[in-house]
Image: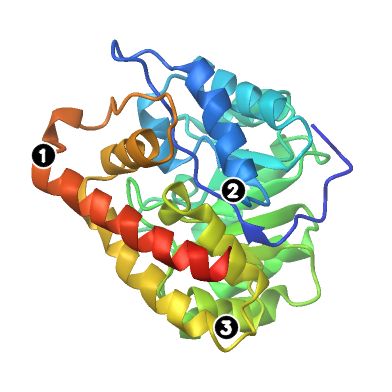
Amino acid sequence: MNQEVRKFPGGVWPVMLTPFCPDGEVDFAGLEKLTDWYIDNGSSGLFAVCQSSEMFHLSLEERLQVADTVVKTAAGRVPVIACGNLSDRMEDQVKEVSRMAETGVDAVVLITNQFAAEDEDDEIWMERCRGFLKEIPADIPLGFYECPYPYKRLMSLENLKECKETGRFFFLKDTCCDMELIEKRLEVLKGSEFKLYNANTATLLDSLRSGAAGFSGVMANFHPALYAWLCEHSKEERAGLLQDFLSMAALIERQYYPVNAKYHLQQFEGLPIDTFCRKMDNKGMNETFKKEVAMLAELASVFSKHYTG
């Protein structure tokens, strides 16, 4: 664990994919190439072992190996974070967090839906979170991810404030998709190193202008450099047109993700990775879907010429 990295940079933090070999094994050589590609295309940090990584279809050992590979490949160029509380039992989650920290990630991210069932209230959630924090080493930097699976648990403002005041949290992957709530959260986090990274493209520009640190969403697997430009130049008037394009482009998420993202990286970014996914059959990537991805890549190249040179 790199204890010096406590002030995470703003900008783009891709939710990383996990490349697999055609036989379904993790492709670690492909993961190294992918890590370099994210960094070379303007990423400020990397979120390994997340839902886009198909983390629920990876064993604990595979999750640790993926995080370790990304940390070693990034080699300090950018900070790396990874989820660390996927196990079913709380005592196993405690061990998992410590083991994930040992890979050298700059923060271990906690999934918000792990502390309470969907029908349990925020007080129960906070009580369990307090207990969990007592069980894990205090020197492990932490983050939160409002993961949509198995259900989306949004943090209440009261719980967010209490977690901020611990001084142990530095990253929030916000998935509320609600600008009004985002503004309230930013007010709670104001003045702290607990930073909000928006996962939603449609609200991204407004959130950046209101103080969000950056973007951590699916579409950084298609064109991270455009998101990096938007994060860096959010105050500029022409950022609005790019925001419009990115919001419409993000509809490709609803097509056949993450297979379509791997297809894009393979066909239009030249990465030597297969389209195999464990969570879905890559054969479902039909010719129409492929054409749509190709059209998106062509449009993105036009915007890249105007915005990133």
In the picture of the structure, the residue carrying the numbered disc 2 is 41
Which quarter of the rendering shows the N terminus? Answer: top right
C-beta proximity under 8 Å, tags 3 and 2: no
Q: Nearer the viewer, residue 308 or 153?
A: 308
Q: Is residue 309 above or below residue 6?
A: below
* Mark 3 residue type: Glu
Residue at x 65%, y 45% (from the top left corner): 131
The answer to whether 202 appears left or right of 122 in the picture is left
Q: Nearer the viewer, residue 250 or 48?
A: 250
Residue 56's tag is none
- Tell me residue 58's x, y (percent): 41, 23
- Tell me residue 150's x, y (percent): 32, 45
In the picture of the structure, the residue carrying the numbered disc 3 is 183
**Number of other residues with Cα within 10 Å of mark 3, as a class: few under 14, some 14 to 19, many 20 or more:** some
> Of the residues tagged 3 and 2, which is closer to the observer?
2
C-beta proximity under 8 Å, tags 2 and 1: no
Q: Secondary structure at mark 3?
A: helix
Q: Earlier in the sequence, mark 2 or mark 1?
A: 2
Q: Nearer the viewer, residue 124 or 179?
A: 179
Q: Secondary structure at mark 1?
A: loop
> Of the residues tagged 3 and 1, which is closer to the observer?
1
